[in-house]
Amino acid sequence: METGAIVYTSVLLTLLVVIPGVALSLAVFPRKEDLTTPERFGLSILLGLTPALMLYFLDKNFGVLITTASSILAYGGLTLGGLGVWRFRRSQAG
C-alpha cells in the first residue's frame, strides 16, 4: 500500500469520527465557553463513536443490516441532528 493511500485513509477515518462527535458535543454544550478546545476535542472523539455503536446495536437487537446506506444515514443523521439541536439551543439562549 502506498504512503499516500495510508495517509488519505487515516485522515478520512479521523474525520469520520470527529465530525459527528463535534456536532454532538455542540448539541450537548452549545456555548463556546462551556468547554475548552482540548475538552471539546476529547469529547468529540468519544461522541464520534456513537453512530458506529448505534449501528451495531440496531444490527444485533433489531436485525437492521449494516450497509452503505444505513451507515450514511446513521452518520449523516446524527451529524445533522446534532447541528440542528445546537442551532435550536443557540436560538433559545438568545
Image (cartoon, rainbow, N blue to C red):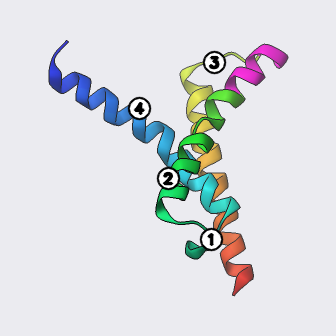
What amino acid is at disc 3? Ile
**Mark 4 neighbour class, 10 Å CA radius: few under 14, some 14 to 19, many 20 or more:** few
Residue at 74% x, 80% y is: 92
What amino acid is at disc 4? Leu
- N-terminal-most mark, 3 or 2: 2
Task: Residue 66: give its label.
Answer: 3
Contact between labelled residues 3 and 4, with CB atoms less than 8 Å apart: no
Q: Is 92 drawn above or below residue 63 in the view shown?
A: below
What amino acid is at disc 2? Phe
Residue matched to label 1? 34
- N-terminal-most mark, 3 or 1: 1
Numbered range of the magenta stretch: 55-63
Using the image as rendered, state which of residue 57 and residue 35 is in the foreground.
35
Q: CA distance from mark 4 to mark 1?
A: 27 Å
- N-terminal-most mark, 1 or 2: 1
Residue matched to label 4? 13
Label 3 secondary element: loop
**Mark 1 neighbour class, 10 Å CA radius: few under 14, some 14 to 19, many 20 or more:** few
**Image quadrant for the C terminus?**
bottom right
Does residue 93 appear left or right of residue 13 in this picture?
A: right
Q: CA distance from mark 3 to mark 1?
A: 35 Å
Residue matched to label 2? 41
